[in-house]
Amino acid sequence: MTEAEPAQVCLLLDGETLSAWAAAATQRMVAETDAEISLVVENTATSERSPLDALRRVVELREWAVVAAAGEVFGRDSVHLQPVPVRSIDGAEDADWVSCEPRTVDGWKVALTDRVVDRLAETDVAVLFGFGFLVGDTLDAPEMGVLSFHHGDVREYRGKPMGFWEYVHGRETAGVTLQRINETLDGGEVVVSKHVDIADAPTWGAVQRRLFDASEDMLAEAVRRLRRPDFEPEAPPADELADLYTTPRGRPVLTYLWKTARGTLLG
């Protein structure tokens, strides 16, 4: 690819839709850069969970299951998470659409088929909006690599749920990171990063909305930067990566409920 040629982009998806925030970021990339969506790879793997599996999951999540259910009932961040058909994005309707049932590696990682990797090699950059933790030749197939969003500053917060721990811990800012991923969890090269003011965010939902809004222009900026010959993204050293947070239990859940009640009343 030369600078005069449009950047050929592949979208890696779990279905035929994107969440509204991801669709907005993709649309802005197409509108503000010379990027063209030339390939869409859809994950066709199915994951069926039995009623017993679902019950075990609720027991595993304990008190967080109640909080998560409440979030679904009250529609937290429904605007940002509404499904948007990928084909409604400018240019995506003309992209080649390829189905892929990935191979599981080490019990939880994912590798794409050789056929799909060959197709990816025809593109310049891929954007990961599905499939899970990718490994193998997929990561090096596009010339500029595979990009993935992390709604958090990887040097401060990793894991899930996005924005929750920053909110519970009373942080004044939260991060958004767009990385060129590798086979190290959250250890990829940082292409674009932001810090968002959340000091006055009354609820966790408000934190999430600010992170989603901040994401909108990052994909376009990533393409612009990767097209520059002098741009060299750097991966954070392993000893600078933050602790990995997981599903909240116990005191953090109580803190969340108290802050949410207070923020809702005052907000």
Image (cartoon, rainbow, N blue to C red):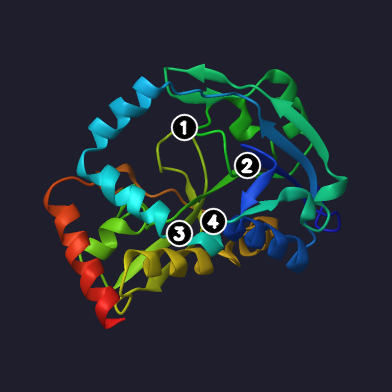
Dot 1 amino acid type: Glu
Q: Which of 260/231 is in front?
A: 260
The disc, 3 or 2, on the residue closer to the chain's N-terminal end is: 3
Residue 81: mark:
4
Q: Which of 131/19 is in front?
A: 19
Rounded to the nearest whole Å, what is the CA distance between mark 2 and mark 4?
26 Å
| Local crowd size for mark 1, using a 10 Å CA cut-off: few (<14), some (14–19), many (≥20) | few
Q: Position of residue 163 (x, y in %)?
A: 35, 59
Q: Quick check: 129 above or below 47?
A: below
Dot 3 amino acid type: Gly
Rounded to the nearest whole Å, what is the CA distance between mark 4 and mark 3?
10 Å
Residue 120: mark:
none
- For residue 50, which quarter of the picture? top left
Dot 2 amino acid type: Gly
Q: Position of residue 149 (x, y in %)?
A: 51, 51
Q: Secondary structure at mark 3?
A: loop
| Local crowd size for mark 4, using a 10 Å CA cut-off: few (<14), some (14–19), many (≥20) | some
Q: Position of residue 266 (x, y in %)?
A: 26, 82
